[in-house]
Amino acid sequence: TMRIVKIPYSLVAADVAAENAAAKGINDSSDSSSSTRRFGAAHHCVSDILPVVPENPPFFAHCDPPWTSYSYTLWHRLIAKSQGLQGGEYHEVVIPGFLYEDMMRCYSAWITTGRIRKGVLEEMLETLKSTKAGQELVSLLDGERKWFIRLDHMSPKDSPMEGGLPSLTVQDVMTKLCTSMRAYTCLQREKVDAVKEDREMKIKLVLNRWDGGMDPGREFRVFVSPPAAAQARTTNHPMAAPRPDDFRISAISQYRWTLVFDVALKPDGTVQLVEINPFGALSPCGACLFNWIRDGKALYGMKEAQFAVTLDEALP
């Protein structure tokens, strides 16, 4: 069974406004922290979630799941197939890692001054275009075809430089990446991983044919709870202590790590896969219309599942 929860849009709007105010330094109170925000918060502490969802050692423990299993490029072909993309309508290009420092300088300039010097951006673009990856990007981003772009873990949709609109040129792409906090986070994480693994950086850029019918207002987030967490609710549960063989499965589908996936409902009634994200209160994945702590028992499968939607009270 599944309970339908209708959330007034005014509550969501107020929560978003409080978050934006906090980001701009208008509100310094703790009310805007991840533990007090009503919707969409992420990166909680273990101490926040433990009273709600107890651990079930050695089978389940709260942790920040590794990003590797949730990389967009790992699931790109499946997502492309779900969205009806044909060959030539989706691509992956690895931006040379040596451009990382240039991109960081551009982002720093944007944050401190609100602009990127034209000469700095042009120099970076010329360097990129002189590489094999850059030449491939030039052929795809020809100023006519429209593309949805993203890095392996996030899109630059938060960029004020039309981050939510299609990209047509290489300059378009690099400007969005260099003015996006989300892209900055991805680049920082890739840098840390590359140093830790003693390898070169791989800045993976995804391009999908732009779909004008992809409406964010008709996207839904689905939470797949880890079975071992649900089993922790009672010690006499028939699977409270499952056999070791039950855990010899891949990391993304095992009991301790699971997933969150986003789907889009199209006007014709079909459903398309949008992306796959890590699951859990400690993860970077926001809980959307839920809260990892307040709604923890439902999200972790310890009580009746819920289907949450937000509605504009002004509509009939």
Image: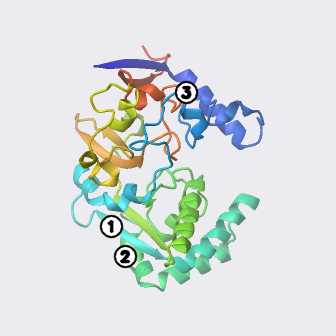
Tell me the kind of residue under disc 3.
Answer: Val
Residue 235 in view here: yes
Tell me the kind of residue under disc 1.
Answer: His
Across and down, in percent, residue 283 comes to 50, 46
Label 1 crowding class (10 Å Cα cut-off): few <14, some 14-19, many 20+? some
Q: Nearer the viewer, residue 217 or 253?
A: 253
| Residue identifier under label 3 | 12
Q: Nearer the viewer, residue 88 or 49?
A: 49
Tell me the kind of residue under disc 2.
Answer: Ser
| Residue identifier under label 2 | 139
Callouts 3 and 2 close, C-beta under 8 Å: no
Q: Nearer the viewer, mark 3 or mark 2?
A: 3
Any mark on residue 91, and which? 1
Across and down, in percent, residue 246 comes to 25, 45
Identify the mark nearer the N-term, 3 or 1: 3
> In whole angstroms, how far apart are the C-alphas of marks 2 and 1?
12 Å
Q: Residue at x 73, y 43 (%)?
A: 24
Callouts 2 and 1 close, C-beta under 8 Å: no
Identify the mark nearer the N-term, 3 or 2: 3
Question: What colour-coding does the image apply?
Answer: rainbow
Q: Which element is circle 1 on? A: strand
Identify the mark nearer the N-term, 2 or 1: 1
> In whole angstroms, how far apart are the C-alphas of marks 3 and 1?
35 Å
Is 190 located above or below residue 221 in the figure?
below
